[in-house]
Amino acid sequence: MSLRAAVASTDITPPVGVELCGYGFYLERASTGVLDSLSARALVLESGSERVAVVACDLLGVSRDLARTTRLLVQETTGIPPCCVMLACSHTHAGPATVPVRGCGEMSPGYVAGLPQRLADVVARAAEAVEPARLGFARGVAPGLGFNRVEGEVGPLDEELLLMAVQARDGSPLAVAYHATAHGVTHLSCNTLLSADWPGAASRLIAESGAGEALYLAGASGDVNPVLAHTGRGDEAGKLVADAAAALLRDIRYADEVTVGGAAEDIALPLERLPREALQALAEAARTRLAGPDTPETAAERNTARVDLEWAEQLVREDREGRARDVLVTEVQALHIGEGLLLAHGSELFCEYGQALKARFTPRPTFVVGYANDFIGYVPDPEDFARGGYAAATVPKICGYHPFASDVGSRLVAALTDVAGRVEA
């Protein structure tokens, strides 16, 4: 069927003064200015009676409730069903706190409450402007962007760069969705300026090259940092990706007969529920650590102990009230856009699982999109559980749930594979 498409963007930079999210516990990183603006970019694609919307946000993440509210607003104004709306985030650590992560930044209630309408509005503007279009894909590499921060040189690394480019029928560019794998952490931990980090720089440079609006769709970067992490050199990382994208765009072949569709389903990921007695012991140990010297040298350890104490007390309280959870419910989503497949989840998936999904659906261009439609923290590999790594052992504390079962990664891969089977190319 003939494709119609349009793109729209909007500024979602919060007011200066909101707390930034990431880089440590209880840092109280209130923003003091704007280094570069944050944006939300919406791409709507229509084929026959079917429409899908991909929204790329310069945010750390969105909650399940925020995504649900946004999608219902989109459905009211455009008719696009929730299962066909993807809200993807870049995971910038120089953006506002938009999800409840303990100790990592306080959310601004007014800003967060206003996001659903702002995101729905940008989708509506794109939906109103659709025109005859054509679509093409390209795949290449972005060498030098990332490294495996958990296992170093021996760890998995996905250097693939995937592009989905959309043109008007006259050949004028509309949008490029690009997919690369690295955390949004090029800024220094002391930075207090709002920024979209390296994906923001890459999107700006791609757009300035004349390729249309650029939408970043984050890969499985749970264990992958940019090589330039914590250097303040995000523009360099962004240029690396933008230059690689420009080279790929020159050789894309486009088609105007394209089908689209989407599906989504809730899944229950298993948690390893800790006994109340173990949680009470952890809380007491944390209180002992907090009773020690309060000096600049002990600040980081005291902040970690505070996280441990608040988490243990929360889970004990939930157990006493009969609200303890054995599973965490989240969503998986699949969009097919021509030959392309977009698989979305709300986690920080370790790289090997993203690679497994890409291999499963080869030769289709497969975008394994993280930080989308929900935020549930890390989904690490079994080795990280065995070593008691940050992803497996610490992140559940800031997200407020019991640790995942060690096979959570394979379960999420299976769920994404299943939902992909519900969309037809």
Image (spheres, rainbow, N blue to C red):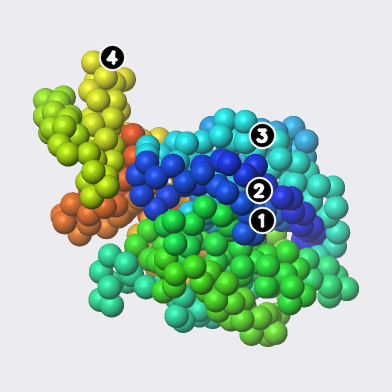
Q: Quadrant of residue 290?
A: top left
The quadrant the N terminus occupies is bottom right
Q: Are marks 4 and 3 in contact (CB under 8 Å)?
A: no
Q: Is residue 379 left or right of residue 421?
A: left
Q: Earlier in the sequence, mark 2 or mark 4?
A: 2
Q: Earlier in the sequence, mark 3 or mark 2?
A: 2
Q: Is residue 247 left or right of residue 98?
A: right
- Circle 1 sits in a helix, a strand or a loop, which is it? loop
Q: Is residue 368 left or right of residue 317?
A: right
Residue 98 image position (x, y, % from top left): 53, 41
**Label 1 crowd (10 A; few <14 / some 14-19 / many >=20):** some
- Residue carrying label 2: 13
- Circle 4 sits in a helix, a strand or a loop, which is it? loop
**Label 2 crowd (10 A; few <14 / some 14-19 / many >=20):** many
- Residue carrying label 1: 37
Q: Nearer the viewer, residue 322 or 117?
A: 117
Q: Which mark is residue 152?
A: none
Q: Amino acid at mark 4?
A: Glu
Residue 77 image position (x, y, % from top left): 78, 36
Q: Amino acid at mark 2?
A: Thr
Q: Is residue 67 left or right of residue 406?
A: right
Q: Are marks 2 and 1 in contact (CB under 8 Å)?
A: yes
